[in-house]
Image (cartoon, rainbow, N blue to C red):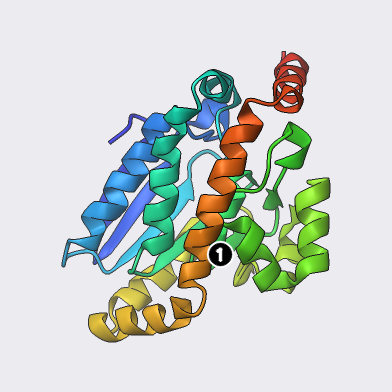
Amino acid sequence: MSDFVTERIESGVQVLCLDRVDKKNAITLDMYQALADALQRAESSSDIKVTLIHGAGGDFSSGNDINEFVQIAQAPEKMAVSLTFLQVLSRYTKPLIAGVEGKAVGVGATMLLHCDMVLASREARLQFPFVQLGLVPEAASSYLLPQLIGHQKAFEILMLGDFVDAQSAHEMGLVNHLCEEGESYQLALRYAEKIATLPVEAVALSKGLLKANGKDDVQSALVREGKNFKDRLRSSEAHQAFSAFLNRNK
């Protein structure tokens, strides 16, 4: 595992924690690899019935590590690690539950679209700021988000990149249930433990049926987005946006 992704397994629940608190759980290539490896292990383990993912320190994830992205822009083939994670995530056959506090930005927000249940603090906020960075949506969000909330609302969220507060996300169906600040992990764990007690084969077959109609479309979206994303990383717009972001943070 990465130093910034922890794993524990208890009562049939695999708990994955993004634990890079000083960077608001920004995700590096090593973390992508660790997450992909953990999900692949879970697929083949009869001891794991459900996977729960959450973030340490008050935020779910601030998305991709921008400093690392600047380096990836010079060698886009390094994106293969993140694309592998997204493929593993999108094909994951066991229930996947997220507990969300604080900010869920970029891939921190788009990975939630692949979860079967999302439990969020009332203070949580989702953001999809790809266009502002000169990029395009990823993680099949260009397909999944319109399917969930309709084209017009998805266009607004993906183009403008404004924060979506937890209440709005709940009303749009992106979040199952809301809770008080600091309680999302425990609420997500309660649901995970409840699902872990259900008949395993029935759960797997039922999730497969729910995902069946969009299965091929999701994979096609991942391929389309990946190609465009890789091209955009080389663009002058993206380079300027990254520079502006890093200078603003300084």
Question: Pointer 1: what residue?
Answer: 119
Where is residue 237 drawn, in percent x and y?
76, 26
Measuring from the top left, give residue 143's x and y in whole percent.
Answer: 62, 63
Asked if 5 appears above or below 157 in the picture, the reply is: above
Task: Please state which of residues 16 and 115 is positioned toward the viewer in this rendering.
Answer: 115
Q: Nearer the viewer, residue 8 or 140?
A: 140
Q: Position of residue 83 (x, y in %)?
A: 44, 44
Q: Secondary structure at mark 1?
A: strand
Could you tell me if residue 127 is visible in this image?
yes
Which residue type carries mark 1?
Answer: Leu
For the question of whether residue 60 can be seen, the reply is: no
Using the image as rendered, state which of residue 80 and residue 124 is in the foreground.
80
Residue 246, compared with residue 206, is above or below; it is: above
* Frontmost residue, 139 versus 165: 139
Residue at 56% x, 64% y is: 119
**Image position of 191 (left or right of 71):** left
Q: Up-down: is 76 above or below 39?
A: above
The answer to whether residue 179 is above or below residue 199 is above
Q: Quadrant of the N terminus?
A: top left
The residue drawn where x is 59% and y is 53% is 110
Relative to 31, 158 lies left or right: right
